[in-house]
Image: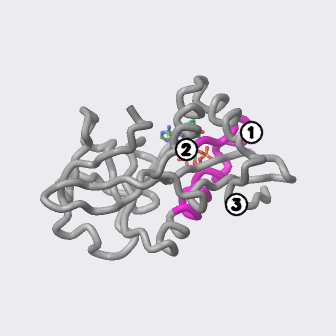
Amino acid sequence: MQFIIREEIPADYKKISLINDLAFKQTDESKLITKLRNSNSFIPKLSLIAEIDNEIVGHILFTKIQIISNEIYDSLALAPMAVLPEFQNRRIGSALVRAGLKKAKDLKFKSVIVLGHKNYYPQFGFQKASNWQIKCPFEVPDEAFMAIELIKNSLDNISGIVQYPKAFY
Ligand SMILES: CC(C)(COP(=O)(O)OP(=O)(O)OC[C@H]1O[C@@H](n2cnc3c(N)ncnc32)[C@H](O)[C@@H]1OP(=O)(O)O)[C@@H](O)C(=O)NCCC(=O)NCCS
């Protein structure tokens, strides 16, 4: 199946909301995306869509977060990600993750954090964030809270609590 991945443009906003509503079967994620778009954490180049024949079928968003300890480290959160139900399991989601990670690296980000399924994200190189003593600010299963270094060893000596943008709460 041929699809392209590109940055979102304002004309895509409605369709991106719809895809999230259909994939998650609720509107929480589309509302989160709208709030994040209007926040300082938003990076337009890291809101990506997958498109087949000019129809958007998937979306992924990475936003700025910080890891707080004695010092403050900039990182990214991957959330949310959605593929239209009838297009799932065709590797569109995987392609969005890989494209997003590559673009994030090109933009000089050094790491990404995700709260997600422990069986899905390790294929991209995500590992338990607790391996680096990086903690989630709320209670989550240890194996669901993951991190990836975009630059080797960039999380060495970085531990602390992730601070998500207000929109997440
Ligand atoms: C998660 C999602 C974006 C993946 O997109 P996709 O295009 O279907 O993913 P891919 O085709 O690249 O990968 C499919 C694989 O992921 C697995 N998978 C899909 N959703 C999963 C989930 N929530 N947890 C664990 N594994 C999942 C599938 O079983 C399949 O496994 P396989 O490769 O062993 O057959 C899509 O299923 C979706 O929109 N789900 C609903 C929304 C959601 O849960 N988003 C993620 C949380 S932010």
How packed mark 1 is, by other alpha carbons closer than 10 Å (few <14, some 14-19, many 20 or more), is some
Give the vertical position of 46 relative to 141 (above or below).
below
Indicate left or right for 124 with 19 as reference.
Answer: left
Quote the CA–CA distance across marks 1 and 3.
15 Å
What residue type is disc 3 on? Ile
Residue labelled with disc 3 = 5
Quote the CA–CA distance across marks 2 and 3.
23 Å
Tell me, for residue 15, which label it has, or none. Answer: 1
Residue at position x 55%, y 61% in the image: 100
Q: Residue 41: image x %, image y %?
A: 46, 52
Q: Which residues are magenta?
A: 80-100
Which mark sits nearer the N-terminus, 1 or 3? 3
How packed mark 3 is, by other alpha carbons closer than 10 Å (few <14, some 14-19, many 20 or more), is some
Quarter of the rendering occupied by the C terminus: top left
Give the vertical position of 120 relative to 166 (above or below).
below
What residue type is disc 2 on? Asn
Residue 69 quadrant: bottom left
- Nearer-the-camera pick, 158 or 163: 163
Residue labelled with disc 2 = 38
Q: Is residue 23 magenta?
A: no
Q: Residue furthest left?
A: 70
Residue at position x 60%, y 50% in the image: 93
* Mark 1 secondary-structure assignment: helix
Q: For disc 2, does the CB lie below 8 Å from ligand 1? A: no
